[in-house]
Amino acid sequence: MKKLIIAGLVGGLILFIWQLLSFMMLQIHGSQMQFTDKQDEILAALEASGIDEGEYFLPNTASTAPSEEDRVAYIEKYSGKPWAKVSYHKELNMSMGMNMIRGFLIDIVAAFLLAWLLLKFRDLNMKTSVIASLAVGLIGYLTISYLNSVWFETSSWPELIDAVIQWGLVGVWLGWFLNR
């Protein structure tokens, strides 16, 4: 159990450090958070609209199931026109403390689960550890980030880079540590 706890803690730290590097220092996700000089106008329009905090897909139909006639009218009205996915919050909170703590705890849990899984392998070695770790990272990427990029027509290259590098590094750590 001690080995599993150490593997999870250090693996979580590796994930957390990579995420800090990826977002803050290397700016791998910079293309997903671009600046527009129209931000003040856009934010003022959203605030003036009186919408509630939440995530919105625009244009969209009301939450009730549209009739076939309404669906056809929607398609005719909006096809070929602009659309947006908006996450709206009423106030910007720059305090990152709790977010960082929650992120680190999730990273520890994820690394712990991977270490637990790897310890179930009969013949665990460095190669198996790295490949299994990459498989876990790629499963997460493909079923979440990549599918979202397909539906919302965005780039998921930053998440692919993260999946390969962070889970590859954790695989190397676990391959070395769990085989000692």
Image (spheres, rainbow, N blue to C red):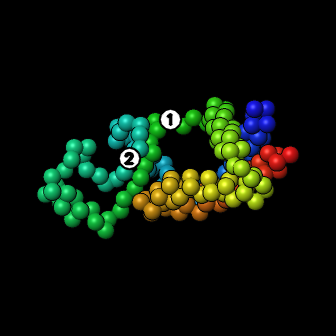
Residue 142 drawn at (x, y percent):
53, 58
Amino acid type at mark 2: Tyr
Q: Residue furthest right?
A: 180
**Residue that badge 1 annotates:** 91
Query: Circle 1: is it few (<14), some (14-19), or many (20+) Cα within 10 Å?
Result: few
Query: Circle 2: is it few (<14), some (14-19), or many (20+) Cα within 10 Å?
Result: some
Is residue 142 visible to us here? yes
Residue 7 drawn at (x, y percent):
76, 40
Q: Secondary structure at mark 1?
A: loop
Give the tally of numbered discs.
Answer: 2
**Residue that badge 2 annotates:** 56
Q: CA distance from mark 2 to mark 1?
A: 17 Å
Residue 166 drawn at (x, y percent):
70, 53
Residue 163 drawn at (x, y percent):
64, 56
Amino acid type at mark 1: Glu
Q: Is residue 105 left or right of residue 142?
A: right
Q: Secondary structure at mark 2?
A: strand
Write the residue at 24% across / 46% down: 62
Q: Is residue 36 left or right of residue 15?
A: left
On screen, residue 104 above or below 15: above
Write the residue at 46% across / 36% down: 90
Dot 2 or dot 1: first in sequence order is 2
Write the residue at 71% across / 50% down: 122
Q: Nearer the viewer, mark 2 or mark 1?
A: 2
On screen, residue 162 above or below 1: below
Is residue 37 visible to us here? no
Write the residue at 65% across / 41% down: 113
Q: Which mark is residue 112?
A: none
On screen, residue 177 above or below 84: above
